[in-house]
Amino acid sequence: MITELRQIQRDENRQLNEALKFGVFSTVDEENPIQVNQASAEELQQLSGIGPELAERIVSDRPYESVQDLLKVKGIGPATLEKIEPFVTTDE
């Protein structure tokens, strides 16, 4: 019984380490959106489809009056905006 519990714990620890390594956990969700006029490039990279280069473009093109303004950023099209829109805001 104890051996089985230890194996389960090892497996869970391995899964947790893998999840952390690949950045599966994020504080960004619909109830806690990223403020695009304030967020760092690193924070913006938590969004699906936003890599380092695109995050830097978002930061450089500030300020944004609405989330739709992100369409003006080179590399953000309607599909990307649709993915990230629930997770970003321009409200302070």
Image (cartoon, rainbow, N blue to C red):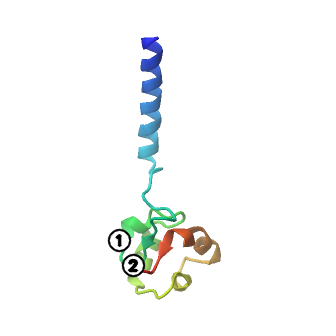
Tag shown at residue 59: 2
Give the vertical position of 35 relative to 9 (above or below): below
Quarter of the view holding residue 62? bottom left
Query: Up-down: is 16 above or below 39?
Result: above
Task: Give the mark, 1 or 2, whose residue is nearer the N terminus.
Answer: 1
Residue name at image x 45 percent, y 40 percent? 18
Q: Position of residue 92 (x, y in %)?
A: 38, 80
Residues tagged 1 and 2 counted as in contact (Cβ below 8 A): yes
Please, what is the three-letter code of the amino acid marked with disc 2? Answer: Val
Question: Image point 44% across, 55% down: which residue?
Answer: 26
Q: Residue at x 38, y 70 (%)?
A: 41
Q: CA distance from mark 1 to mark 2?
A: 7 Å
The furthest residue to the front:
31
- Image x and y of residue 83, in percent: 60, 68
- Residue 79 occupies quadrant: bottom right
Q: Which mark is residue 40?
A: 1
At horizontal 35% and vertical 71% (from top left) the residue drawn is: 40
**Secondary structure under the numbered disc 2 in the rendered image:** helix
